[in-house]
Image (tube, rainbow, N blue to C red):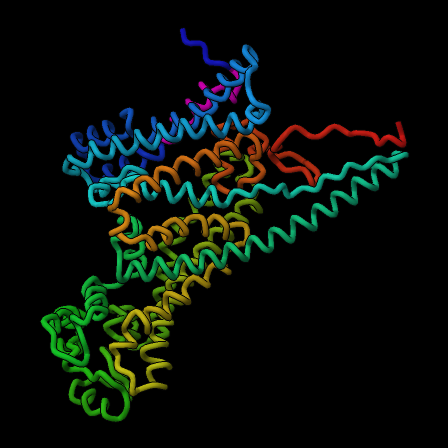
Amino acid sequence: MLDIPDDPSHPVQIALRTYSLAASLSLAPAVISLASSPSWPALKRILARELSLTGFPFAATLAVSGCYALQRLWVKLQTTHGHLSPRLRRDVYKTFLSALLSSGISIWLLQVGARRWRRRVPSTAASIPYTPPDLYTRPSPTLDLTLLLLVRAIDFDPEDSSIHLDLSASSISEEALMRKLRAEKARRVNLRRKILTSRVDAIVFWLSCYKIMMSWFYAPQRLPSSYVKWIGALAGLDKRLLEALRLLRVGKWSYTKTTDHASLLHAYSSELGFPSSWGDPTFVPAFGGSSANHIWKQLGVTTRPNLGGIPCELVHNGYGRRFDLQHSCTANAGLRGLTAFFKAITIYLPVHFLPVLLTKPQSLLRPDKVLRLLLSASRSATFLSAFIASFYYAVCFTRTLALARLFPFISHNFWDSPYGCILAGSLLCGGSIFIEHGSRRGEMALYVLPRALRAFLSDRWLRNRSSRIAERITFIFSLATLLTAAAHRPDTLRGLTRWTLTFFVNGPNAGFWKKRKLEPSIPPTPAYTPRPHQPSSSNS
């Protein structure tokens, strides 16, 4: 019978925890997607792909547990032979070099498996976190995972937030006073760091959202396909209108010249209950001013005096029709925000309740705890609601309510372009992050930043061999940095990174998972063995 060591930091224990969590992340979304339309052949292919030696669970387990297994082997060899340079005798160097080797094997396995499965036709549209079916069209199937690790590694903070003072005291009262002063100083430093970090996180989120939204409109191939679908579901924008905006950018759908795609929005306009001519750029005025009013009178449009461009009713996509508010830009933004809130609350309720349910389920019996969780989930849903509403209000503000009225001599080829209403909406929507709690802004920023970085990379460069080499180096060093920090300085990690790696390395009994009463200057998860008190020479 296999004897599993009781030590939670033993490589076997680490391997069991890593494989179970990685397999859950890989298989759960696919199995849930197949639940609505079960397909045994599709399920067999998914299991064969994910549970093979080149699947994500095995590669992740090899990287994490392999690192600490090599580190332990190194320590044993050192105690046996002892022929190492002083620098390599340090545990942190052993861990880092071991992580480099295990991470290199891991990325090799993932890419070998991806090349093998790329030759096969995908049998299901199920979305799997790190080895998705749409990897057949990507320049690199592991690019999203590599950028995720890079961003998490960049978030690694090598400075300890606690204050260490080597002070001696001649009396118990003086020693207690020194301890209180040290704790108060540490509290102030930590508070300033938290405020600064929260503001930086918000700015990173804001800029990332701008790039992501612009890419969603004009270069969706630079974003994960599942992310594109999710944004599209929340945006509620008709695909034909989205296509018209993309064609407008390249001059194939224009207000000032006849093109082959002028009839693109005819059917869309008719489906909304308006004349098809409302969606034809050759019929609607390109410029504002009094000259546009004559054209609007012929078309039967009464809501765009002194304005050009297609009516905003087409942009609203029927929102508010039930209440006869489809003509109102303000009602459109408000109703879209309200719809997004109810969609978001179904996402954020599990996000806030599941961690508590898994770690401290008894606390859910307290009404005050449940109320706090409900308020937190509502706050997060309000953030996403404001994100959607602010985007659409900025669009209407630019092309209808204010800016286009102030400058009627500018063509709507500009106001409806990437430099007009789309730019305004993409810039404004990210500001909704300030609604979210400061402690969650960091995780939100770390979630969107890899996608924004991917959007900056050109498809042409990503298809070159040099990009593959750069990606492998980035993957190896990023993962090695995280594994080394998890083993020696977990206090320098935060959020989901710290939660996951602490579970991998130390198990569910780690200090980070336990509720302990510590001084403010002591991190919840000890980063290293506390320094012993050294009396000064004057008192010896």
Residue at 30% x, 87% y is: 408
User: In the rendered image, which quarter is residue 44 located in?
Assistant: top left
Does the magenta segment cover residue 439?
no
Residue at 28% x, 90% y is: 289
Image location (x, y in percent) of residue 21: 40, 30
Image location (x, y in percent) of residue 184: 74, 47
Residue in front for this viewpoint, 365 or 56: 56
Image location (x, y in percent) of residue 33: 25, 40
Above or below for 120 versus 14: below
Lateral position of residue 158 relative to residue 58, left or right: right
Image location (x, y in percent) of residue 307: 28, 85
Does the magenta segment cover residue 10?
yes
The C terminus lies in quadrant: top right
Magenta stretch: helix, strand or loop mostly: helix
Above or below for 175 versus 225: above
Residue furthest out toward the top: 1
* Residue 197 visible within the image: yes
Residue at 20% x, 68% y is: 250
User: In the rendered image, which quarter is residue 337 located in?
Assistant: bottom left
Q: Magenta span covers which residues?
A: 6-22
